[in-house]
Amino acid sequence: MRLVVLGTDTEAGKTTLCALLLAAFPERLVYWKPLQTGLPDSDTVVRLVPSAVCYPALAAFNDPVAPVLAARREGKELPGPEEIARAVPQPPPGRILLIETFGGPLSPLTDSTLQIDFLRLLADAAFVVVTPSRVGAVGRVLQTVRAVESHGPLVRAVVLLGPRDDFAHSTLVRHLPGRAVLSVLTPEEWTPAAFEHAAGRQRATLATLLELFQPGQRLSATPARVLLPGPAERARRVSRDRAVVWHPFTMLTGPEPLEVVAGEDEFLVLADGRRVVDAIGSWWTILHGHRDPQLVAAAEATLQELDHVHFAGLTHRWAIRLAELLLGTMAWPEGGRVFFSDDGSTAVEVAVKLAYQYWCIKGKPERSEFVGFEGGYHGDTCGAMSVSRDRVFFGHFEPLLFPAHITPLCPDRLGELLRRNANRIAAIVLEPLVQGAGGMRIYTAELLQRLVAVARRYDVLVIFDEVLTGLYRTGRFWAHEHAAVVPDLLCTAKALAGGLCPVAATLVAPWVVETFRQAEPEHVFYHGHTFTAHPVACSVAEANVRRVLSEGESRVGRIERFFRQRLAPLRGRRGVRDVRILGNIAAVELDLPGGYRAGVRQTAIAVGLHHGVLLRPLGPVLYAIPPWCISDRSLEAIAASFEACVAELFD
Ligand SMILES: *Cc1c(COP(=O)(O)O)cnc(C)c1O
């Protein structure tokens, strides 16, 4: 947990605020000022608050001028944004790291960077802007907030230091909705006693800044701009849609589509003005909420620098950082790599092709077959279809698919299959713990462990398709962490950029990478997609992953607890075959014949809309994977819509 104190300028009162916070909460905070010039602020802090714990500066210079200038005068080099970010100390558990910045957020850092270039790497921190409470405060604060937020980070609170100024206070509240605005009195003198006294008297006010870390505290999306068409325009659009657009998984003569005009938080706004809860998070992509402010800001900031560039022989820092972050989530030793693509299916195609080529390099080109599992789903491209082979989805395409073995999720059956065919098999492909499109079928970590153990026994590669289950959906960053097993290749997509834009990745284990590294030049991996590692998508994904790592547990825990309490009682109701819950995934399987074609979709959509909820069942399975920002009220609406569907179909 990090609290970053920004000033509207030098002498804005950053050190004063830090010292007050440390005096008020010595047991909660640890102080760090990475770059110091002149009289070190950390000395001042320790003098004023003898109990304060301070980490040493990364670099300190004698001249009280901009760090880049001070460094030049001493013939030294300043650390760059990435270097400072890597040096951020890890405070003891439960403590908050208080980071004091220098100058203003846009003050120069190195010759070619600004301080903000470091700050935006701290996407999961809470940012506070401090300014003296005197004439010009409103303008100074708004300029600073806008400048910071246009680069990505969101400012959570503003502190006016000095006697309360009602005008400044109320004006800032009006222009900065959702942020805390505080007035804090400065101590009478610069002595430990005065700081202790001022901190003690204002403890409750200062505590607001620590509460920025309460789980559940969040910034809503800025309200969407909603343009509602009139009834005639609505009808015209739908009829144009039906004339020119081909929708996925939809009969050309199927029911009319619903037009969506806007999204914010957990809601979609329909063209007729209804606001409905997006219960399935727009096909499992929307993680924090629609138009999440941090992700939108990350996209906007990147667009000010670069739009798109091809990725063969070129690179960019957004892709590098995302790759580092993703590899950091894996229990692999050093040496893994990330191959970027655009969506889940392409991530799977890459994994399948890499797995086969791996065996070619090893001199075993006969290992060209794959094993998938009944109920599995890996996408709609030919390779992905081949390894899932669902009859309803892919039956027509059978002649186009390559040979693959489809077996039940059963270690004995897999063992039998591999015993007979191991020398022809490249890899097994499976979704850890939850078979999503197959009907949100949940299985145990123990079963996953046993399946992987069988594959290992026969020296077959293991591909985890975490396109749905990754990013904390199941209560861990990756679902396979529940089973403490590791794959050779891992696919991720869907929520990787929090639903804001498409991006996918295939993570490759070090030992697979090593095989390719040592291979002859003809074994270069000839594969790529036009938009591989799109910079905007990578930057959004990076901001997203950082947040998921820091917030995932509390956000998902809350939703899981709600589902367990509220939906478990549906078990045993007439018409309910099963209730399955894991992480933020909840599924209610209805007792209906017909499998995927069970005719509940239109009923569920109608009943859901009546309850203000947009549902889209998978065959007879009603399910929800809501955005994490969802309110208790919207969660309740989802539960009520499930109950109403059961009642409608069975009572
Ligand atoms: C959705 C999904 C895919 C396919 O992803 P697309 O982005 O739709 O191509 C692959 N695997 C799993 C597990 C999925 O849920």
Image (tube, grey):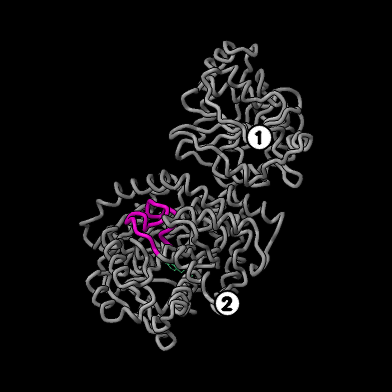
Q: Confirm or reject: label 2 Cβ below 8 Å from ligand 1.
A: no
Identify the residue at horizontal 53%, vertical 22% (top origin).
52
Q: Which mark is residue 521?
A: 2
Image mark for residue 59: 1
Q: 512 or 147, which lies in front?
A: 512
* Boundaries of the magenta span: 468-487
Residue 73 figure quarter = top right
60 in relation to 253, above or below: above
Determine whether the residue tagged by mark 2 lies in a helix, strand or loop: helix
* Residue 326 percent location from the top left of the image: 50, 56
Three-letter code for the amino acid on which mark 1 is drawn = Ala
Q: CA distance from mark 2 to mark 1?
A: 45 Å
Report crowding for label 2: few under 14, some 14 to 19, many 20 or more residues within 10 A (C-alpha). Answer: few
Which image quarter has ligand 1?
A: bottom left
- Identified by mark 2, the residue type is Pro
151 relative to 427 in the view: left or right: right
